[in-house]
Amino acid sequence: MKKFNVTVNGQVYEVEVEEIKTSGGAPKAAAAPAPKAVPAPAPKPAAAPAAAPKATAGAGEHSIDAPMPGKVVKLVASEGQSVKAGDVLLILEAMKMQNEIPADADGVVKKFNVAAGQSVKAHESLVILG
């Protein structure tokens, strides 16, 4: 019997291997026994809050889309609020930076397609302005 230390995913296991000699060839190693300790699996991350179905822009309305993937930190404006071009609608965190997403034109916030804490993809509709 030979003893070996084997490291798997940062966990060290001690295994014993028995050498078996055969009559006509090279020695073969027997299968190692199961490890003594098994690390616990990592917990699954919590799911982001579910959002209402996405609204699409109708006649006289347009969508403000995410310029990059990220996570919505805060909704600054509210539905029904009048906004001017440049007013901040929401805060989007991407690559550990908080980005202010502004209105691109004067109008009224018709619908938010996202909620605080929600992850978004690039070019996903965030807000409908009318």
Image (cartoon, helix red, strand yellow):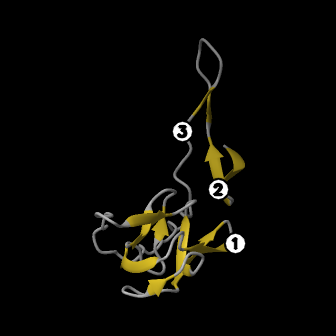
First of labels 2, 1 by sequence position: 2
Disc number placed over residue 9 in the picture, else none: 2
Q: Nearer the viewer, residue 14 or 71?
A: 71
Circle 3 crowding by C-alpha within 10 Å: few under 14, some 14–19, many from 20? few
Q: Nearer the viewer, residue 38 or 102?
A: 102
Residue in view at x 69 percent, y 72 percent:
97
Label tally: 3
First of labels 3, 2 by sequence position: 2
> What residue type is disc 2 on?
Asn
Residue 29, compared with residue 81, is above or below; it is above
Disc number placed over residue 14 in the picture, else none: none
Of the two numbered discs 3 and 2 in the rendering, the one whose residue sits closer to the viewer? 2
Circle 1 crowding by C-alpha within 10 Å: few under 14, some 14–19, many from 20? few
Q: Say left or right for 99 vs 130.
A: right
Circle 2 crowding by C-alpha within 10 Å: few under 14, some 14–19, many from 20? few
Which picture quadrant has residue 36?
bottom right
Of the two numbered discs 1 and 3 in the rendering, the one whose residue sits closer to the viewer? 1
User: Which quadrant does the N terminus fall into?
Assistant: top right
Labels 3 and 2 touching (C-beta < 8 A):
no
Tell me the SS state at disc 2.
Answer: loop
Gap in angstroms between the C-alphas marked 2 and 1 = 32 Å
> What residue type is disc 1 on?
Met
Q: Nearer the viewer, residue 75 or 37?
A: 75
Judging by the rendered image, the residue that carries numbered circle 3 is 31
Q: Say left or right for 105 vs 47.
A: right
Residue in view at x 52 percent, y 86 percent:
76
Which picture quadrant has residue 20?
top right
Judging by the rendered image, the residue that carries numbered circle 1 is 97
Residue 19, compared with residue 129, is above or below; it is above
First of labels 1, 3 by sequence position: 3
